[in-house]
Image (cartoon, grey):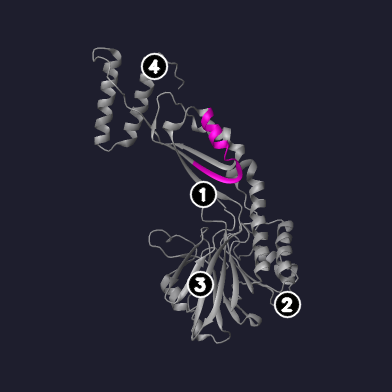
Amino acid sequence: MLRILHTADVHLGARHADLGEQASAQRERQFAAFRATVDLALAEKVDVLLIAGDLFDSNTQPRRSVDRVAAELKRLVEGRIRTVVIPGTHDVHDRSSVYRAHDLAALAGSTGDDDFVTVLTPDRVDVHLRSCDIVVHGRCFATKRAPLSPLTGLDADKDDRATWHVGLLHASIAIPGRTDRDEVVVTTEEIAASHLDYLALGHWHSAQQGKAGGVTYAYAGAPEPVALDQDRAGKVLLVTLEQAGAGKRVGVEERTVGRTRFEKLEIDAATVASQPALVDQLTSRTDPDLVLDVRLVGIRPDDLDVDVDELERQLRGSFLKVRVRDVSTPALTEGALPPPHTIAGAFIRGVEGRIAELEAANQREQAAELRDVLRLGRLLLAGHEVSL
């Protein structure tokens, strides 16, 4: 049996310009997820750690960042666990590559006489780890956009160096109309024709698995979200390769290493008494590791006035990130209408008639705007003060 831990898209050193004050904290969370990945590799006593590209967010890295990574890899060297890294599209192996500027293997304590840390390059497209009876195949390029598929010409059935053949790529799987402009693309037909035992992929930040022919492939996703809408990030994959009679069996198990959690919450506007009451309701869920997506739904009472921008500002310190959307619908008039010859009666009948026409024509946005007009108009006609 061979045990592999598969990660990718760590994006260490990402700027996170959209996070403002929290950018530095998110960078530390990403490094913590990488450290947790190393902890897991040691705890599970895996044979190989595979890093499928974009370990670094860019090739412009301070030496201290590289040293921190090397220190983690050194823990694996001391634990007799092999690591194989392939550059991605952010840390591409061009002339300014971080892997050219720094000898990651040497910094991690792996000498030229062992195979404990291997960085694949355009000139080194595979590595045979004899002690693990595995060949790791991984073609990368000296440019961000690949001149050809990295699986071109690869057929593991024609390679008798080892029992196990695993691919390591940073690439998109071809999806017509969606991945046509991606820098590195492979097809499921090419995956099937490679006859690999397993293909470890990076580039997509959400964990997912598939099969092409007899080849199991998977994206590990980012171990900590790079963008805070990646709700399938936070994982690494524990891969088990074992002989099963005359055949082989591949098992893939997701393990969580990231701290960020995601929650979507729908709240019926009819149950909300006021904006302060809504703030109290949501702050009861305070969690600095939570990305909270709140939607106000249902029929909104006339006297409920929610300012979502202000609400997000009030909640900002309670969560890693919070988003509030008001998709509730103002109520139509209840009970008997005022007489049609009155201002209120004429207004309500005119606006409700126009709302009915718009909804019948499926013009939902315009109808929603008029529902707000109707709500505000009813409040004004009833003598309430309304802030616009």
Q: Earlier in the sequence, mark 1 or mark 4?
A: 1
Amino acid type for the residue under numbered disc 3: Pro
Q: Is residue 283 above or below residue 101?
A: above
Q: CA distance from mark 4 to mark 3?
A: 67 Å
Q: Is residue 121 above or below residue 294?
A: below
Res 148 seen here = no
Image location (x, y in percent) of residue 14: 62, 52
Image location (x, y in percent) of residue 161: 58, 86
Amino acid type for the residue under numbered disc 2: Gly
Location of residue 222 by image quarter = bottom right
Image location (x, y in percent) of residue 380: 39, 16
Q: Which residue is mark 4?
A: 380
Q: Residue at x 27, y 12 (%)?
A: 342
Q: CA distance from mark 3 to mark 2?
A: 26 Å
Q: Earlier in the sequence, mark 2 or mark 1?
A: 2
Q: Which residue is mark 1?
A: 229
- Quadrant location of the N terminus? bottom right
Q: Earlier in the sequence, mark 4 or mark 3?
A: 3
Of circles 4 and 3, the one toward us is 4
Let me know if residue 288 is in the magenta part. Answer: yes
Callouts 1 and 4 close, C-beta under 8 Å: no
Q: Is residue 356 above or below residue 103?
A: above
Q: Is residue 22 above or below residue 83?
A: above
Q: Which mark is residue 150?
A: 3
Q: Earlier in the sequence, mark 3 or mark 2?
A: 2
Q: Which residue is mark 2?
A: 112
Amino acid type for the residue under numbered disc 1: Asp
